[in-house]
Amino acid sequence: MIELHPFKPPAPHDVVAYRDLLGGEFWRRVPAYADVDETQFLDHLWQQRHSVKTPEELLATVRELASPEFIADAELGFRRAPMAVRVSPYAIALVDWNDPYRDPIRRQFIPVASALLPNHPRLTLDSLHEQADSPVPGLVHRYVDKALFLPLNVCPVYCRFCTRSYAIGPDTQNVDKVELAKTPSQWQDVFAYIASRPELEDVVISGGDAYQLPPKNLELIGNALLDIPHVRRMRFATKGPAVMPMKLLTDHAWVDALTRIVDRGRSAGKDVVLHTHFNAPEEITEITQRAMRVLFERGIFVRNQSVLIRGVNDEPERMQRLVKRLGYVNVHPYYVYMHDMVKGVEDLRTTIRAAIGVEKFVRGSTAGFNTPTFVCDAPGGGGKRDVHSYEHYDRENGIAVYAAPSVKPGRAFVYFDPIDQLEPAARERWQNETVAQEMVHEALRRAGTGDDSFVVA
């Protein structure tokens, strides 16, 4: 007789709890928005007008919610931060103001001085050396067949951890920003360069943030690139759906412009997609689901690129929930980046070891095409490397060495874990520059890149 195995029992509800999206008029919990109805809150113009753009505006908005101690802490944090302030009402309303210090939304946009850590001695503002790979203003050409176009320097919000804190947003007390190509006349030099390089097939339009491009400029850029025969793929990059999803519901001109570019690309056999940037499962609400449905019904493919951020998504279960929630709203998880080695946000970085552990936990949670690749964008311009593909990783001292033979052969690229995450003895070693240099040299030697044929980028 054949023995029949019982059916697998149904999964408990907590397995599908990622489908429980925040709904209702949750923004009314914020006193400043208590009288705002749904029509007004979903108006993208209202969101833009009421986005807080100074520390004073932000603190006035939340003063009734947060303690005086938190307000004072944030005021000092803003003075020390490399990024300017811009936070949408939607993002402010998602913060748990009963526990703002641990809240993952607050951590991304509102610095507090008490949490700031000393910068790792190897940190810079332009850790990826984008300016060194910029043949014309507003364009980064690092990979052979791909370029990054930066046509503006503004965003719907300013993330504390921005990899382009050297250029994005207005000047701060600590950083004078580098100029990007911000006008259509300057963009012509970018288009001319791309047209002159037949190996370029893939262009990412970022900045800044494509959400902030007026519809006419969105189409100007899209059509100019589609007119170049060898450009086959185009990606518009935006944080917008995570922090102002209602724009996709009420800014019909912008969505129609994007749709026309996507449709024209498809008719020409070219791929035009939207890349977005969700970091925390709390950023995805019923409003998000409605917004993503608009893009899905128009045939606009959406991929997500997250950053692994301490206290936001570095716990395996939280990253798993984010990945599954993204898939639930028709957004494909694509990359999870190691936090770039930029100054002023050391409290947000985590270790290569932690990234490997999170990836191991997440893989197998859902279909492979809905599982992100965890990468380290190698400091110094080596490009994206699988986080576990290092040549050598000194876990004790937090030094990972990567090679990028197809991008910059003959060079070594070194990522450094945050010092406060190391054991006390290792932290002490980093205080001695001579010892630190010896540690780095030893890691390069063990990676096989310590001979004269390799240059440390």
Image (cartoon, grey):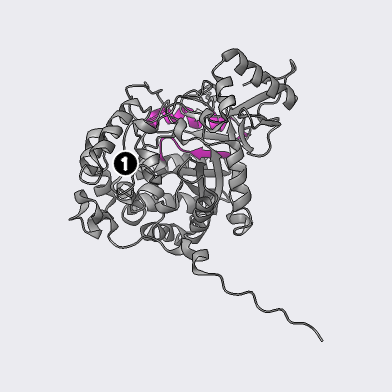
- Residue 353 versus residue 321: which sits nearer the camera? 353
> Where is residue 369 drawn, in percent x and y?
61, 55
- Please name the residue shown 19% across and 54% down the image: 34
- Residue 179 versus residue 444: which sits nearer the camera? 444
Which residue is the site of mark 1? 87
Q: Which residue sits furthest left?
A: 35
Magenta-drawn segment: 181-209
In-image side of 208 versus 370 (left or right): left
Residue 188 located within the stretch drawn in magenta: yes
- Please name the residue shown 61% across and 38% down the image: 353
Q: How many marks?
A: 1
Quarter of the rendering occupied by the C terminus:
top right
Tell me the quarter of the picture where residue 413 sits: top right
Q: Is residue 147 above or below residue 367?
A: above
Tell me the quarter of the picture where residue 52 sits: top left
In-image side of 115 versus 371 (left or right): left
> Where is residue 243 drawn, in percent x and y?
37, 47
Is residue 46 visible from the viewing direction of this image? Answer: yes
> Where is residue 184 drawn, in percent x and y?
39, 32
